[in-house]
Each structure stands twice: as C-alpha cells, then as structure tokens.
Image (cartoon, rainbow, N blue to C red):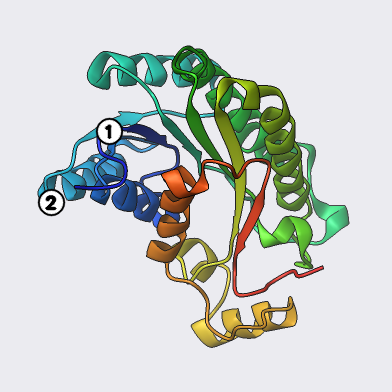
C-alpha cells in the first residue's frame, strides 16, 4: 500500500533527469503517472521502468509550450485513468550560459514559453478536473537560479521567479477548491547540472559559492521524495510555499 494509491499524476519533462525520478517516486507510492516529454522514446523508457515494478504509466510525446498538445495530453490522461489528482510542472528548457547582455530575444522567449507559460497551460488544463473533485496537488519547479546568485542564467532565472509568482497566485485563487499549489526549488546531483560543469568537483565548488551550507547535493530521488511529500496527506495544509531542496544554495 502506498500513500498515493488510486491517485493520478501528470509529470512534465519526465524523459530525463529529475522528471524521471519524480515520476518513479510517485509511482512507487501507488499513483498512476502520465509522463510527458518532447521525445517519445525517453518517456517510453520511463514508463517501462515504472511498469517493471508493477506501476501504471502512460507515456505521451508532448511539447508543453504548445497549448493544444498540453490539452490533448490531459484528455488522454482522463481517457486512460479517469481523473487527475496531481500535476508536476518539471519541464523547462534552458539555453547555454552566457553574459546578461548577450541573451537574445529568441532565448528569452524559449525560457518563457517552456517555463511560466507552459506551467500555466498545464495548470489551466488540469484545473476543471481538480475543481470538480474539490481536491488537487500542483507542484511547480523553481530554481536556485531564480533566488540565488548564478551568473549567465538571466533568462532562466527570471522565468523561474515568474513561476514562483504563478504558484502564489494560483494558491490564493484555487485554495477554495481544495487545491494546493507549491514550488520546489531544487539543486541536485543531476544530469541537468552535470552538463554545465566539467567535473562534479567544479559543480560543487560553484554551488558552495552560491551559498550551499550542506556540502553535498541531493540525489534526484530525494527531489522525488519532496514531490511525494507535497502530494501526501501530511502536506494538505501547505500551499503557496517555496520548498528549497538544494543544500542551502541561494539562502537570502
């Protein structure tokens, strides 16, 4: 028996990295999980891993910056599992690091369209089903880049802070329907972070400089457990929260 038995979740960006770990941990607690990614082969593999231990999963190719694709993915989830209880907005594209003044209009648009706008699309698409049930858990993903001090990430940083504001606004407006909306700010020993640094030592040195007070980063599975917690009965009164799971990076 899992604490999320009979629940249905959608996890975006679930083909790689943290999204895979989040989907896996939700499934281990009994949730049926729709996994979304722009690359079908990636989410098909995530679904295979979930089904391997007896979980239920639905892989869907979906570009979350396209509202029609988001709406279609939600409809497919309803057709397959009958409802939606949990939404995890994990997906967000990030261009390569470069100085503030060198970011382009296109790069700024990408971070906006795949981050705050995509999260809003998914939230609005899931809302009618959660409202009807008078319950739901929405978890958006921020970043230490938004409230910390990482140079070279300006477009991504401001998009992540917009997601935090999106979370607070939805929490205020949708609480009356029994829907909680929270943000997790992770900084993990993940594939995403590894691609930006030459070695794990260089990565850790960078995050120490950003204020990490615990000199070890969380593993992806630990981010997944934070997601599970916010979906659990223990967190039913938590909404509008920024939960930092990042060893203290960006403490302000």
> Quick one: 176 or 126, which is closer to the camera?
176
Tag 2 and tag 1, C-beta contact below 8 Å:
no
| In this view, 9 is above or below 204 | above
Quadrant in which residue 244 is drawn: bottom right
Where residue 86 sits: x, y (%)?
A: 43, 33
Name the quarter where the C terminus is drawn: bottom right
> Quick one: 81 or 105, which is closer to the camera?
81
Q: What secondary structure is found at the residue carrying circle 1?
A: strand
Q: What secondary structure is found at the residue carrying circle 2?
A: loop
Q: Which mark is residue 59?
A: 1
Q: Is residue 173 left or right of residue 140?
A: right
Residue at image x 66%, y 74%?
248
Residue at image x 75%, y 55%?
146
Q: Earlier in the sequence, mark 2 or mark 1?
A: 2
Q: Residues within 10 Å of mark 1 (few under 14, many from 20)?
A: many
Residue at the disc numbered 2 = 53
| In this view, 146 is above or below 9 | below
Q: Which mark is residue 194?
A: none
Q: How many marks?
A: 2
Asked whether the viewer can see residue 109, the reply is: no
Where residue 12 sits: x, y (%)?
A: 45, 38
């Amino acid at each position: 028996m899992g604490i999320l038995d009979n629940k249905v979740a959608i996890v975006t960006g679930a083909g790689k990295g943290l999204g895979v770990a989040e989907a896996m941990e939700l499934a281990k607690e009994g949730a049926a999980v729709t996994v979304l990614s722009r690359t079908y082969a990636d989410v098909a593999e995530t679904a295979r891993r979930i089904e391997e231990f007896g979980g239920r999963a639905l892989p869907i190719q979906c570009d979350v910056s396209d509202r029609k694709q988001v709406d279609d993915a939600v409809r497919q989830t309803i057709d397959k599992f009958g409802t939606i209880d949990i939404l995890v907005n994990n997906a967000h594209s990030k261009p390569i690091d470069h100085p503030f003044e060198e970011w382009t209009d296109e790069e700024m648009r990408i971070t906006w369209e795949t981050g705050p706008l995509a999260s809003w699309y998914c939230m609005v698409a899931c809302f009618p089903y959660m409202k009807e049930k008078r319950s739901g858990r929405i978890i958006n993903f921020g970043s230490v880049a938004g409230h910390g001090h990482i140079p070279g990430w300006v477009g991504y940083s401001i998009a992540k802070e917009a997601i935090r504001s999106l979370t607070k606004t939805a929490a205020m407006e949708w609480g009356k329907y029994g829907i909680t909306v929270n943000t997790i700010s992770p900084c993990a020993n993940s594939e995403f972070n590894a691609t930006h640094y030459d070695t794990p030592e260089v990565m850790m040195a960078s995050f120490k400089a950003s204020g990490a007070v615990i000199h070890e980063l969380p593993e992806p599975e630990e981010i997944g457990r934070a997601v599970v917690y916010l979906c659990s009965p223990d967190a039913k009164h938590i909404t509008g929260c920024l939960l930092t799971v990042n060893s203290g990076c960006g403490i302000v």
